Amino acid sequence: MSVLSYGILCSLDGYVEDRDGGFAWAAPDEEVHAFVNEQERAVSTYLYGRGLYQTMRYWQTAGGDPAESPVEKEYAEVWRAAHKVVFSRTLAEVDTPRTRLVRSFDAAEVRRLKEESTGELTVGGPGLAAEALRAGLVDELRLLVVPVVVGGGKSVLPPGYGAALTLLAERRFRAGTVQLRYRVAT
C-alpha cells in the first residue's frame, strides 16, 4: 500500500497562510526548493482541494521562461508528470492534463488510490488534509517549518485533531527552515 503524506510549508506558530491569506513568507529558497523537488519525485498522485489546485496550476506552464531558476524548471517537470485528483464541490472543471475532478471527499476513494498506486500520494492544502487526517488516511506529516511567526491565519492542522507521532527525519537548511517528518500512529 502506498504512503499518503501531508507535506506543507508552515510558520513556526503553525500557519500555512497569514491573517490576510498571504503566504509569500513561505516561498522556498533554492536549497529548500531542491529538497522538495527530490522528495516529490516519488509522488505519483497529488490530492488537492480547489484552492491549492488553482494555485498549483501555475506549474503546468512554468519552466519555459529563461529567468526561471533550474529548480523551478525541475519542479514544473515533476509536477506535470504526476496525476492530480481535485476534490471540489464548486470548481466547474479542471484544465490540466493527468487531472480528474471528484465532487466531494471520499475516504473510500482515497483508500483505493493508496492500494492501487505505484508511487507515493500527497494530500495538499489544510482543508482537504483535515478531512484525510480525520479519516485516518494520512501516514506521514512532512512539515517544512519556516523561521517566521505570523500570529494567526489558516492553521496547518485542524482544530481538535490529535495523534501520536513518531519522528522519522529532521533536516535543517541554511536559511533556518527545518523539515520535520513524522509517521502518524494508526
Image: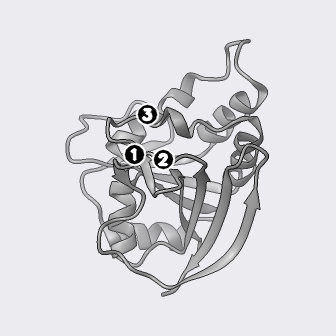
Compared with 157, 127 (above or below) is: above
Viewer-side residue, 125 vs 77? 125
Q: CA distance from mark 2 to mark 3?
A: 13 Å
Foreground mark, 2 or 3, reads: 3
Task: Please tell me which of labels 2 and 3 falls first in the chain.
Answer: 3
Foreground mark, 1 or 3, reads: 3
Residue under pointer 1: 100
Q: Amino acid at mark 2?
A: Lys
Q: Amino acid at mark 1?
A: Arg
Question: Mark 3 and mark 1 in contact (Cβ < 8 Å)?
Answer: no
Q: Amino acid at mark 3?
A: Thr
Residue 28, numbered label: none
Residue under pointer 2: 84
Graded by Cα atoms within 10 Å as few (under 14), some (14 to 19) or many (20 or more), the crowding at tag 2 reads many
Left or right: 62, with 112 as reference point: right
Q: Position of residue 133 (x, y in %)?
A: 39, 71
Q: Position of residue 89 (x, y in %)?
A: 21, 47
Residue under pointer 3: 55
Left or right: 86, with 82 as reference point: left
Q: Residue at x 59, y 54 (%)?
A: 145
Query: Which element carries disc 3, helix, strand or loop?
Result: helix
Query: How many numbered callouts?
Result: 3
Question: Mark 1 and mark 2 in contact (Cβ < 8 Å)?
Answer: yes
Q: Position of residue 86 (x, y in %)?
A: 37, 47
Task: Please tell me which of labels 1 and 3 falls first in the chain.
Answer: 3
Foreground mark, 2 or 1, reads: 2
Graded by Cα atoms within 10 Å as few (under 14), some (14 to 19) or many (20 or more), the crowding at tag 1 reads some
Q: Residue at x 64, y 68 (%)?
A: 181
Q: Position of residue 13 (x, y in %)?
A: 47, 57
Query: Which element carries disc 1, helix, strand or loop?
Result: strand
Quadrant occupied by the N terminus: bottom right
Query: Which element carries disc 2, helix, strand or loop?
Result: strand
